Structure formats: structure tokens, C-alpha cells
Amino acid sequence: MKKIKESEKMTVDDNDPDWFSAAAKKQEGQEEVRRCREELKKLEKQEERVSEIKQRRHMVKKSSVQRVDDEFEKLFQDLHEVKENVQRELNSFSGADSLSSEESMLLLDDYDSDQEDTSKKEKEEDDEDDGCLKIYYCSRTHSQLSQFVREVQKTVFGEDARVVSLASRQNLCVNEAVTNLGNLSLINDRCTELQRGKKGRTSKVDGDDVVCKKKKVTSGCPYYKNTALEKLADNLLLEVQDIEQMVSLGKKTKSCPYYGARYAVKDSQLVILPYNTLLHKGTREACQIKLKGNIVIVDEGHNLLETIANIHSVFVSKLQFMGAHAQLSQYMQRYEKRLSPRNLLYIKQILFFINSQIKLLNEGRKDNILGKIGTSVNSSNDSGAKNQFSRMYAVHNFMSETLIDNLNIYKLIQYIEKSKIAHKLHSFSQKFEGTLKSNDVKKPGSEASSTSAFLSRMTCQNSGKDKSKENITPANDVKERESENPEEEIVMGSPLMQVTEFLRALLHSSADGRVVVSVGSTNRTSSVKYLLLNPASQFHDIVKECRSIIVAGGTMHPMSEFRNQLFLSAGADPERVREFSCGHVIPGDQIMPVALSNGPTNTVLDFTYQNRGNPKVLDELGRVLVNLCTIVPGGIVCFLPSYDYEQKVFDYFLKTGVIDRLSGKKKVFREPKKSNQLDGVLNNYATIIRQTSSSATGLTGAILFSVVGGKMSEGINFSDALGRCVVMVGLPYPNTQSPELKEKIDFLNKNVSPGPDGKSPGSVFYENLCFKAVNQSIGRAIRHRNDYASIILLDHRYNRPSSVQALPKWISIHLHQCEKFGQAFGLIRKFFTGKRIV
């Protein structure tokens, strides 16, 4: 049957006319064409629609992004209010207290530790190359960075170079409601809160002024708008501007220079930034600074090793631990029923860590355990720290002793960062200041630990009422330049931030650092400090990623320290490390360096610690200074080893009449201990020198008593008449009894090979600390090629061959080594009576 049907079909098909088959095929083709045309039209309309949407979105983003943001925030707020109403009803059923909308912002979000894995992916995405070779130029202070920017503006590259300067919020923020807070930590906290769009009181721009208005919903900082920031970033790249010009532009355009500069980094060619931003890995990543394949220039690099060590060393006082404990425990007590189990777990781990530190410091004070096995530091001038004991721990031993070795420190840090708990605590303490009592929470120490009490103590600290940090006397032939101003307690909006930094430091390799536990008679003098011994460990990433690194400075000698302890220890190829040095830009006849061993009465100028208080030596010093004031025009800057010794010398000179004799020739000034008084002293010093240059009062200028390592020994230019003579009194050797210095010397002796001369690395490091301070101080004078000055080194030890070699080449090749004062006096008089360039 099948075969018959197939034959019949074939017969029918064969009998069909050709035109019928052709018509059927044509109709099918036309139908397919129609269908394709309809699909094409649909696709074209879809493309037009997509194009229209994209264009509209682009226009919205460029011109009306704020309106869209406001609508989104309104929608989000409506949803948030609905959620709050539902939550309030649930709380009423469960019997829990309801929270206001503002207080709800203080609650921690549910934390998922799995989110930590996404940080690696985000980091890999951020590591993409910008495609533009960059030069990162860093220096110590903002004034030095601004000076460099002004020099760039003078060059032929000033018009075409894309330059941007990075600085802290304190320097770049233009929101007066934030900058008026004064403290850097509070400024950072407030800025972060505004970026999160916190409810309540907010800053709103009204003309050129910033006023506070109450709004139901805040849109964050009025200067933080995407469109305005993008325009500001473009303007920053169009013209080279220093920090002051950036702030002026930000106020004019009502946009934030702090974030605008970060927007501009990606497209810039030259990035100007301070030390901390470049050398600290966490800060570097937060600013999205990518070093791979780029160039780094470190100016004022003479203290680079110490700078890296200080940046990564962390100091936390017992007062800060107690403040963090008070805030965190009271926060947990108030919101315990509303926090997820995982949040509670991490908070309790943080509290355990803080308690372990407070317990360690309490036991040390109670039993003097540290005093029996540690190092005692006498402070006869400080009633608050007469018996302070210190002990050095290896990191693993410290963690074992405090029973925190079972904690996962890495996850704890991740939690603090991801949950923003430190910022929440800051807002919490502000809201409930003065309302939470110390008896609400178990006290970790013997003193009140309420949030309000903590804030009160921190306010007293800020006002400078604590005098327990001054005038610590060393116990050897020392330079106490840091002793009078030991670790300044860092005041944070939330002390948990400083605790977090200490936790992060504990993640460093155990061999690279130590933990110093100091126990004093007060909470302020008791502290825990992480001390970084190996700066190369934190410089490794920079050496590995950068195309080249240039470390420059006027007092870099000796260079072996940088080569061995920094670059080679950080993993640099020895062939990559090259050195270049040159002489001073001024001719030799414009400098008169003199090393003097004896005074006018032939008394040996011996300023070792044991002899520096000798009345005969002090009398001889007074005679030298009086004689110098009679022949040196303009200003004399006299550097003494420490604030304590400067006070003793000045008091002795007052008693013996030396100050009166000096005042007959020059106005006498002293370096202030408070930073806010520095500008006033310098301005008065400069004014007197200008006035006496053309007056008939009998005064020939001014003399300024300063301190090595103080506020005037670095970064201040005493050019021309401001510094015609620099006097260095003694050799400022560090305190050999310092446990930190001892540990550093031991570390170098164990891990660094001796030099070609056979000297131990520790002894070389100790000598270098002294002469780097000397070289930095005497470099305050002769600031340009037409300047001239005399350098007077008062101590018989300056005439030793080793001391001469330790001085910078531009000093040592012209140095006059004088045993007798008459010889030195004749050279100095001849130098200043000759024809000089004005």
C-alpha cells in the first residue's frame, strides 16, 4: 500500500502545472520577506529606543543627577519608613523598645563573613593599569609640597602637565560645618557620616555661606556631587594648582577638592602627595594609587627609614583602651537584642582583646611585674610618671601572654572595616554623651569607664592640661629630643580606630617588630606600642612594583644605610641601586664652617651628658655666644640637644647675666614647645632682623635658641639675614637606655652584615642618628646660591676624624678645625667683614 500511494503522489505532482508551483514558492518567499522586514523594523525601533534611553541617561547623569538621586532617596526613604513601621509593630508584640529613625542608623547591618572573599576580586579589578605613566612625588609637609608645585608652575611643563595634589581632609575640605570640628579624626568621621547620607542635621549651601538646616532626609555633603566633582577634576588637570588654589576653586565651584583630586588621579601625569599617603599600604589603596610600572620620587629622604618605621608603629594608651571598651560595651548593652549573633560574636571578641590589654597594664601597675624584669625610666621632673617600667615582647610572645593567640586577627579586622563599627561608635558616643553612666557597664579598670567620662578625659587631653609628657631626663650621654614629647596620644573620634591599627600591626611578621608595654602611675602614661624594627618589610611592595624609585635629599650621607637597610633588604636587585651626589650650589667662599674645641678662657667645650651641666662649661658657652653676637650680623640660630637642656641653659644665663649681655646686641628668642606659637615667634624674629638692619638702636639682629629635632630643625628656611650663623652645641646622641633603641640596635646586629670597616650595624645606626640630626639642623642656613653663613660646631668631639667624615661633604671639605677660640674668632670676623653678597 505504501508503494502505491507514493506512486500516486508522484503522478499528481507531475501533473501540477509549473505556474502553480512557482506561485506557491513566490508567495512563501514574499511571506518570509515580510516577516523579515517586520523583524527588522522591530529591531530598528528597539535600537532607537535603546539609543534614546542611553542618551537620556547620559543627559541625566550630566545635568540632573541630583534630581534622580533625590527621587531615589525619597523612594528609599518611603520603603525605609514602611520597614520601620513594620519593625515597630513587631517590637511592640515582642515587648522591645522602639528606636527612632535616627538611632536606627546606629545599628550594625547583618554581617556575612563570606563577603570578605569579594575583596580579592575587587582588588584585582582595581589593579588594572590606567594606561598612563605617572610620577608620584612625595615629601614630608604640605608646605614643601606646595613649594614644589610652585616650581612646576614656573617650568615649561607648567602649561601642559596634568598635575594633581593629594592632601588630608583637614587641608582640602571646604565644608565649614566639617572643618570647624578642628580635630582631624573628627573631621574624617563627620565626612564619612555625610557620605553615608546620615539623617538629622546637615550642611546645606546658601549662597557662598554654609548654614545648618534641619531636613527629614539629608543628601549628604552638599559639596559631594558627582557632576560637580567630575568638572572639578577636569579643572584640576587643566591647570597646575597648589593646595590653596585647589581649595579656592572648590569653594568657587561648590565641590569638594578632597574627592575631586582623587577623581583626577587616574588621568594625571604627576601626583603630589605626603609621605603617609604613599608609604602606608592601606592609605595608598584607599586613594587608589597604583604604583605598578610608575615612578616614585621621595624628597627630603634623609629620614625615610625612620619615617616608614613611625608610620607603621602604633601607640595605644590605656586611656584609649578604656574609652574603646566603654563605648563598645555600652553599645552592645543597648542594642544587644537587635544585633545578629555574628555581630555579637565579633563584638565580644573585640571586647576580649581590649580587656586583655587593660588587664596586662593593670597587673603591671599593681605588682610592678614589668619593673622587676623590664627597664626603668626615671622622670624626676614628672610627678605623674616617676616610676615607669617597660618591657619588650616578640609579637607571638605578646599574643600568648595576653591569651589572644586563638583569635583570628585577620577576620576581626575585616569585620571592623566592613561593618563600619568604629564610625557607628563615634556617632553613638556623640548622641549619648553625658547620658550613659559608668555603673551601667562592668568597668574593665579601676577608673570610670563611661562614654561621657571618656569624652571628658579626651577633652582635657586636647586642651593641653596634661603636663606629664614633658622633661623626661635621660640616663646617659644622650639627646633627649623625643623624651620631652614622647608618644603623643592620638585622639580619635572613636578610640576603636586606634585599637584597630594596633590589631593590624600584629599581622606583620613576628620577626619585623616588637611590642613595648609601658606601665606608669596613670592611665595616660601606661601604654602598649607596636614597634616596627624592619622598615624594608613595608617598602617591599613599592620596590617590587615601581619602575624606578628616586630618594633625594640635601643630607643623605651616609648612603650605605639606604642601600643595605632599605633597598637591598626590601628585595631590590643590587644592580638597580645607583648613587649620585654633588657639591653645594654655593661657592666655598660663601661658607665658614668651624669646629671649636676650647672657649675664650681655654676651657674645653665638653657637652657630654655628664659634663654639660658643669658651670664652667656653661660660662664658656655664654662667652662664645656673646663674642659671636658682636661680629655676626643679622640672625643667629643656636641649636641645643633637648628642650630640657635648653631650659637649663636659659635659666643659667638669666641667673649669670648672660641674657642681658646678649640682649645688648641682639633680641633673644626661644623656640616654643607649642606648635600654635611657632608662627608668632618666627614672625617676630624676622621682623626684628628687618628693623635692626637699618636702625640706630645698637641691636644688630636677633638670636634664636632652638632644639635639635624640634620644630625649627627641619622644614624651616633661615635664608639670608635670618640665618647668618648656625651654632650647634654638643652632639645630640640618642638615649642609650631607651628599650626601643636597644632593641633596634640588637635587631640590626643580628640581621644586617657589618660594613667594610668592620663596624657593627648597630653602632653605625647609633652614630648616624646623631649626625643626621646635626646635618639637618645646620642645613637650615644657606638656602640659595647667593646666600652665605657661618656654621659653628661647639664641642671638642667635632674635631675627631670620624665626626668630620660623618658631616656632609659641602661642610667637611671647607671645615676649619680650631683648638683655640682666638683662631676661630679671627676666621669668623674676617669672613663677615669681607665684601659679602647681599
Image (cartoon, helix red, strand yellow):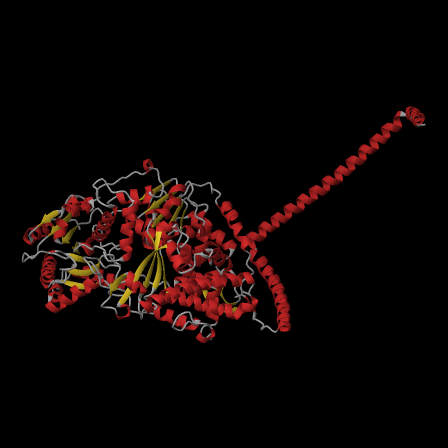
Q: Looking at the picture, tell me which residue is in the foreground, 758 or 696.
A: 758
Residue 814 percent location from the top left of the image: 14, 45
> How many labels, in total?
0
Res 208 seen here: no
Q: Looking at the picture, tell me which residue is in the foreground, 422 or 330.
A: 330
**Left or right for 375, reference 22:** left
Residue 455 percent location from the top left of the image: 41, 70
Res 250 seen here: yes
Q: In percent of the image, x 58 and y 53: which residue is there? A: 60
Q: Looking at the picture, tell me which residue is in the foreground, 612 or 198.
A: 612
**Left or right for 364, reference 669:** right
Q: Looking at the picture, tell me which residue is in the foreground, 54 or 297.
A: 297
Q: Quadrant of the N terminus?
A: top right
**Left or right for 505, reference 804:** right
Q: Quadrant of residue 712?
A: bottom left
Q: In percent of the image, x 7 and y 51: which residue is there? A: 819
Residue 706 percent location from the top left of the image: 21, 60
Q: Is residue 296 above or below residue 71?
A: above
Residue 772 percent location from the top left of the image: 23, 50
Q: In percent of the image, x 25 and y 54: which residue is there? A: 717
